[in-house]
Image (spheres, grey):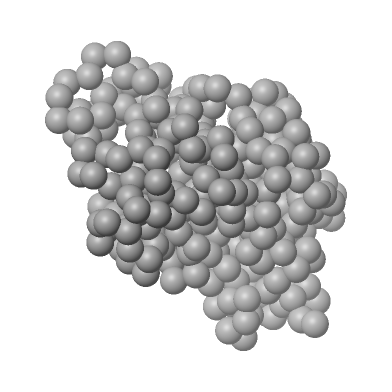
Amino acid sequence: MHFKKKIHTRKRYAPGEVKPKLHPRNKHRERYDFKALCDSCPELYQYVKPNAYGDISIDFFNPKAVRALNKALLMHYYDIVDWDMPENYLCPPVPGRADYIHHMADLLKSSSNDQIPRGAAIKCLDIGVGSSCIYPIIGVKEYGWSFIGTDIDEVAISSADKIIASNPTLTNKVEIRYQRNPNDIFAGILKHDEYLDLVVCNPPFHSSAEEAQAGTRRKLKNLKGKKVTNPKLNFGGQSGELWCEGGARKFLGDMIRQSKQYSTSCFWYSSLVSKQSYVTGVIEVLNKAQAVDVRTIAMGQGNKTSQIIAWTFLTPDQQAQWIEHRWSG
């Protein structure tokens, strides 16, 4: 296959075309340059071919192809030299995860004299880091932040640790901690007198395995235009990644109530909220918890739109002291 000829025969893959709604600093606003990605990660080459429209692409219904694309993106854009993850674990789309990190940088900027706090002194907690370690990889590369990643799945913990050990850029900047109690989010993770500048979280979306399967069937039916009886998740996912008892609504409520117990340990707590209908209820819980400041941030890619909810319990005086002691200089 001759990449140069194929890539430049269609305008939709011409350099400079921008994907709608992605953050202005997102490296993935333009169409994928599969030649460059394959140069960075030859493993991807076997999955790249013309699609039904004659464009160079991959089969996004093939989990191995999706995983290879993620690996190529991380190697090409984020200085990763070795990355892999177990089969059947969630392989999150890199562009959307990058968007979350960039929006959080803007959130910190809004509290810091219009300057994005950078460097390893800025400590972030990734709740549910997963086997892919995506958020820490992006946050370290883009802003030099340091990360604590937590998970309740020992296989995911082992995979994330392996990624960190295999990549010098992550050494001493990312620490993975196992959450032994799935009902706790911060307890058992945060140490005494440990402070966080930012918490990020992508909570389990569904309330049961059956609901997760039904959601996958709907997604594939919409994409393929026909009924799918035995869905195979193209992005994978284990139970703790895709669903939890009570779903995202309960998880977010628990997270807010537990964050209140650590009200002075973190500047900005945040989480993705995948359903617009959840936002009002989440804000009501935050009001009951007496959050000092609550922000909603729209985040979208293509036809998909989601919300980020961010909150802080710090008073204006406490925020000013935090910025002076942790972000200045």
Location of residue 57 with respect to 106 vertically, above or below: above
- Looking at the picture, how far across and down is residue 112, in whole percent? 63, 80
Q: Which of the image's four quarters has the C terminus?
A: bottom right
Residue shown at 64% from the left, 42% from the top:
133
Q: Where is residue 316 in the image (x, y as percent from the top left)?
A: 62, 78
Q: Nearer the viewer, residue 122 or 315?
A: 122
- Confirm whether residue 236 shows in the render: yes
Quadrant of residue 146 within the rendered picture: bottom right
* Residue found 69% across the figure and 58% down from its top: 140
6 and 297: which is toward the camera: 6
Spot occupied by residue 187 in the image (x, y as percentages of width and height)? 72, 39
Residue 190 is at least partly visible in this image: no
| Residue at the (62%, 86%) spot, across then down | 113
107 vs 15, left or right, is right
- Which one is in front, 67 or 8? 8
Q: How many labels does the image show?
A: 0
**Where the N terminus falls, by quadrant?**
top left
Q: Is residue 169 above or below residue 211?
A: below
- The location of residue 184, given as percent across then percent down, is 65, 34
**Residue at the bottom extreme, as displayed:** 113
Residue extending furthest top?
230
**Left or right of residue 299: residue 200:** right
Q: Which of 159 and 57 is in front in this view?
A: 57
Residue 79 falls in which quadrant of the image?
Answer: bottom right
160 displayed left or right of 45? right
Q: Report the residue at 20% width, 30% height from top.
A: 224
